Image (cartoon, rainbow, N blue to C red):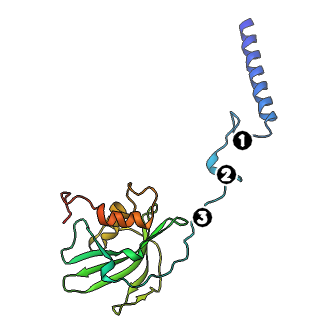
Amino acid sequence: MAMNRWVVLLVMVSWGVLTLAQAGDGGNPYTAGSIYDPHESVNPNVEEYEWQEQNVEIPAFPEDENLIEFQVTRPNAAFSYFIDANSVSYTEADGVVRYTVVIKSRTGAKNVAFEGMRCTAREFKTYAFGNGKGKFVRPRKAGWKSIADNGYTRYRKDLHEFYFCNSRILDPSSEKIISELKYGRPSAREPGFR
């Protein structure tokens, strides 16, 4: 009987201490025994991050002497891929690498596009296309799209993986990116590279 009184007394004292602790903390939601769910509330001390793209200027149309050829895994033998060294830039404020890509066919036809790539989001955007007369033309709608791994446009995946967003470029700059394009190419022994 005496033992039961001690158990009851211990439970009452514990309950009282817990109640006092919760009352004295000013309603702190992190107090033990609370049913606080951090995912259901907004912390007023943390600003919501909203990514914003910087203003973009279309560069000059590429000249052949400034083109750097790069390799593409599983390439289509009918095409060669180049980046205009004068167009390469990295904007730290929005984390976008911008570049002009030139795709040449064996018959001499050229497709030219000025694009941007977000490494962290694995997305690209086309700002302008070559019009076949040495001028850039903006598309009607330009939006960010996921980088796909398919045929003709596979070059974007390889630019992302091997040249623009690889682990060797911890602090990107146009000089480092151009160096990767010139000297950081994957080994020719790797399967899929020509």
Which residue does the image show at 32% across and 66% down from the upper left? 181
Give left or right: position of 60 versus 157. Answer: right
Residue 189 higher or lower than 174, as above or below: above
Please tell me whether mark 3 sits on a helix, a strand or a loop. Answer: loop
Give left or right: position of 83 versus 106. Answer: right
Q: Quadrant of the C terminus?
A: bottom left
Q: Position of residue 156 (x, y in %)?
A: 34, 69
Question: Spatial distance from mark 3 to mark 1, Cα to Cα?
Answer: 27 Å
Question: Spatial distance from mark 1 to mark 2, Cα to Cα?
Answer: 11 Å
> Label 2 near label 1: C-beta < 8 Å?
yes
Residue 55 higher or lower than 175, as above or below: below
Q: Which one is earlier in the sequence, the residue at label 1 or at label 2?
A: 1
**Residue that mark 1 sits on:** 29
Residue 61: tell me if it is visible: yes
Q: Nearer the viewer, mark 3 or mark 1?
A: 3
Q: Nearer the viewer, mark 3 or mark 2?
A: 3
**Residue that mark 2 sits on:** 41
Q: What kind of residue is marked 3?
A: Glu
Please tell me whether mark 1 sits on a helix, a strand or a loop. Answer: loop
Give left or right: position of 183 versus 118. Answer: left
Q: Which one is earlier in the sequence, the residue at label 3 or at label 1?
A: 1
Which residue does the image show at 40% across and 63% down from the upper left? 176
**Residue that mark 3 sits on:** 50
Q: Position of residue 145 (x, y in %)?
A: 43, 71
Which residue does the image show at 50% across and 80% down from the upper left? 57
Q: Quadrant of the N terminus?
A: top right
Instruction: State which quadrant residue 166 falls in.
Output: bottom left
Q: What kind of residue is marked 1?
A: Pro
Question: Spatial distance from mark 3 to mark 2, Cα to Cα?
Answer: 19 Å
Residue 1: tell me if it is visible: no
In this view, which residue lies farthest toward the bottom? 133
Q: Residues within 10 Å of mark 2 (few under 14, many from 20)?
A: few
